[in-house]
Amino acid sequence: MSEYHFLYPYVFKNGLRINNRIVMPPMTTKSSFYNGMITTDEHAYYAARAGGPGIIVTGAANVSARGKGFPGALSIAADGMIPELLRLSTAVKARGSKLVVQLFHAGAKTVPALLDGKLPLAPSKLADHSVEVLDDAQIETIVADFAAAAKRAIASGFNGVEIHGDGGFLLQQFFSPKTNQRPDQWGGSIENRARLALMIVERVREVIDNAEMRRPFLLGFRFAPEETDGGFTLADTLQLVELLREKVDYLHLSMSDFKAQSETSHEDQLTLSALAAVKGETPLIAVGGIKTPAQAQEALALGADFASLGKELIREPQWVQKIAYGDEDSLRTTISPCDFEELAIPPVMQSYLVTQFKQTMGFTRLED
């Protein structure tokens, strides 16, 4: 067996065995059909990376039509999505990776043109654009939408669901005091601001527990550690983790640098280590600039149970296989647009990689 701990298998408490401790995190391809149905291009993209990471998490899938956040978003909001999602999960699992679908509602962070004339939904009024403030009945509908999406994920053959609690989307909008100014049970204290996330987690857990499955099924939660400029702090998130850790099968940290220090803590501490100290026995997935085997190993040494590689798995779909084979020197750490077809990167995804991620993808050359 390799010296690298991340190549060893992992078994969750519910019995699900993962081949290794490497995760492909949720990264939208923006390549689904207009109604959110997965495309052939996306099938090829995920299939090209299956068999390497122990877990692959899909890009965010909206749980309702009004929860859509951007053009080309994946959807799990209707039963009609199930056949193609089942085809995807079957292909990925056949290659040895476990497949998890990320569930989300964009809330106020959406493109209004996608909502058929309706206003974006939000916990509170916002100064920068018009929204519809959610009432109790609408909040209950959103909770039910997440539960229904979890049922579809089970029917689609996925190995789990991950609740999207970061990215500035609805659950983070509720958790952040910058965007949640409610005076009722949904605002104010950390417990109140976390109430929606906890309700969704509990309702999805009920769906999983009541499903007649002969296979273990994961429930994860992805979150950002902190905001600046009056948002939630690392201390707030540590309390959120305390509330969540007994209710989920794993926690997925969202950071740009896995070794970053907190910007809101009064203590001089690494964010990852601080979260690892309070998460108890709940597995923690670390992410943020992990490219090399040494960095993945370091993330585990800092307290993570899994290392999540984003851009590196776009550039190098065979990352895990090459390391297991002892061929680290052949790892692709840069990318050329000439590589796109070989790497099965969908055309729309190619477009945003060379624009939004021009400085961070490691392009060897781009046309002016």
Image (cartoon, grey):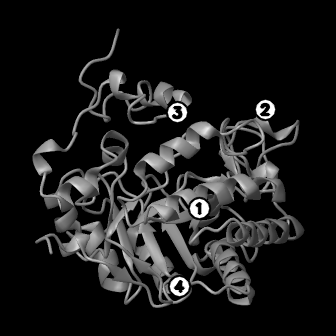
Residues 60 and 200: in front is 60
Foreground residue, 131 or 275?
A: 275
Q: Please, what secondary structure does the residue beneath circle 4 have? A: helix
Q: Earlier in the sequence, mark 4 or mark 3?
A: 4
Q: Nearer the viewer, mark 3 or mark 1?
A: 1
- Per the image, the residue denoted by label 4 is 243
Give how far apart the Cα atoms at labels 1 and 2 are: 34 Å
Depth-wise, is mark 2 or mark 4 nearer the camera? 2
Looking at the image, residue 240 sits to the left or right of residue 362; the answer is right
Cα–Cα gap, marks 2 and 4: 36 Å
Rendered position, 345 above or below 20 = above
146 or 97: nearer the viewer: 97
- Side of 304 relative to 340 (left or right): left
Alpha-carbon span between mark 1 and mark 4 = 34 Å
Amino acid found under the numbered disc labelled 1: Thr
The disc placed on residue 90 is 1
Mark 2 is on which residue type? Answer: Ala
**For mark 2, what is the residue?**
113
* Mark-to-mark CA distance, 4 and 3: 38 Å
Q: Are marks 1 and 4 in contact (CB under 8 Å)?
A: no
